Structure formats: C-alpha cells, structure tokens
Image (spheres, helix red, strand yellow):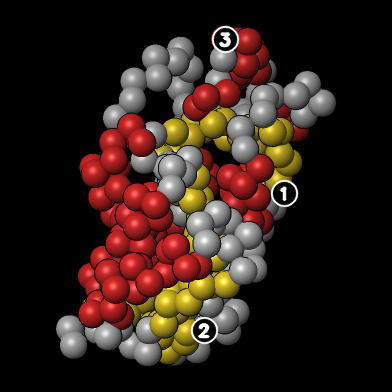
Amino acid sequence: MKKDKTFNINIMLKRVFEALETTYKEKTPNLVFYFSKGVPAKMKGSSSILYFIILKILQHLIQKDKLDEILISIEAPDEFLYKELVSFKITNISIREDELMPSLIERVKDDLKLLDNATLTYSENNGGSIELATHLATSELGCRRHYRMPSKDMLNKNILLIVKGRNLALSLTKMFKYFPMNVDISIGKYKDKFLINNYDLVLIEDSLLNGDLENLIIEDKEINKVQFALMGAKNIDYNINIPMIFLEKPVTQGSVYNLLIEVFNKNESV
C-alpha cells in the first residue's frame, strides 16, 4: 500500500476534471460539487489511488451515457476528529445497476484494494447513485472549521448568484453559506427584482453575461463599490469591457474561499 500523504481535496478534484477535459475535450460534462461542511480541505490518504478511482468511475459513466452534467457530493461527519469515513456520491444516474456496476467493479477492483476499507456501491436513491467510500485522515487536527475567514468583517456579506442551472445554483449557495454569507439566486438570467446596489459581490455565470447586463454593471460601478466575478471555463477570451474577478469551473469549496479572500481580503488563500 502506498504511504499516505497530505493532499488538498479541492486540487485533487480539479485534476480529475482536467483529465476528463483532456480526454473528452468539447464533450466534457460539467461537474457540480456539493461539499458537506465537515469535509476538510487537507487530508491524508492514498490520494493518487483515490484520484484514479474517481476518474475511472466518471470515464465509465461518460462512456455508458451522454452526460451534460455530473453531480458529485463529498460527504464526511460534521465532527471530523481524526480518521473518518468520507464518501464521494454521484447522483441522478440514469443507467440501470445491471448495465453499469459489473463492468465498473471489474474496472476498479484492483484499485479499491489499495484504499483504506474502500467500498463502491449502487443505490436506487437520488435518481440512481454510485457511492465510493473510504477512510481518510484530516491533517488539521482539532480544527472544526476548515475554511476560516481572517476577519469577522468578511462574514455575512450579501452575495447575488446569476447562474443558468438549479443544480449549480444549489451547489454554490451551499458553498457560500458555509462562511456564512447571505445569498440570493437569479436563475436563467438577471432579474430586475435583485437590485445590484444591495450586494457586496455579484457572481455571474459566463453564458449569462450579455450586453444589457454588462452595461448595467458599468453604470453600477460608477456609483458604488459592488464587486463582480465571472464564473466560467479557463483559457477562454471573454472579451468583456469591465474588470471582473474570475472563478474557474468546476467550482469547489476551496475556490469559493479563495474568491472571497480575493474580493474582501488579499492576505490568504487555500
């Protein structure tokens, strides 16, 4: 068994997406992450084996079905004392168990033996789901809050999310409320009932940033100090006429933390 090493869960999941992006290019599904509040940013375990198993599971799903979006929940106990069971649950799978699991188990069975008490199971819950579970240790002993803002003045800011889909909206809302932040959601497009002047940060998904919204932001920036961030794919020239902080997809708990630090305090990052 490989020696356990400290790794950052956010970076590991980003690497999984980058590997999928390299393989499938324009056909890469969107990954939407849901983090439970007990998941540490930095853990100890066989991260390379974990990485390859998650990657193989996602590759298998993509090969079996044409997916535009994959939902992944990362769950751990709220009180993560030292070594706890951490699960990676992929939900809303339309493929039947008998069509999916035998070949998937065959594909990852040797890797599973290298993880600490790892299991891979299928459930009819959540529209059909696959759950990979293994024991991981926290590298932050005694830490009950894994992403801590450097100042209380950075808490309870007003955030507006302008996003296309409900799954991403729910994911982002959970991540921002961790800190905690006050979150409003405008799904599908910017709606006038959300007065931009009322917010400290407005996060806009790239596909929803049009000329009208851009002009509204330009007018708004002349009269107050609202910050704006654009969420999208890397290596794209968006050719926008206003300064905006960039949040790369797929979004993790760590990248939301880093965004908030960049907007409200420039002294820390994860």
As drawn, the residue found furthest toward the right would be 193
Compared to 6, does 210 lie above or below? above
Q: CA distance from mark 1 to mark 3?
A: 27 Å
Disc number placed over residue 182 in the picture, else none? 1
Q: Nearer the viewer, residue 124 or 259?
A: 124
Q: Amino acid at mark 3?
A: Gly
Instruction: Select label 1 or label 3 by which is in front.
Output: 3
Residue in the image at 51% along x and 57% along y: 95
Compared to 182, does 80 lie above or below? below
* Position of residue 35 measured from the top left corner of the image (x, y, whole percent): 54, 63
Circle 2 is placed at which residue position? 80
Q: Amino acid at mark 2?
A: Phe
Q: Is residue 189 left or right of residue 3?
A: right
Q: Nearer the viewer, residue 190 or 261?
A: 190
Residue in the image at 52% along x and 84% along y: 80
Q: Specify whether residue 175 is in view.
A: no
Q: Specify whether residue 28 is in view.
A: yes
The reply to whether callout 1 and callout 2 are in contact (CB within 8 Å) is no
Q: Quadrant of the N terminus?
A: bottom left
Residue in the image at 29% along x and 73% along y: 106
Circle 3 is placed at which residue position? 211
As drawn, the residue found furthest toward the front would be 98
* Position of residue 166 measured from the top left corner of the image (x, y, whole percent): 66, 42
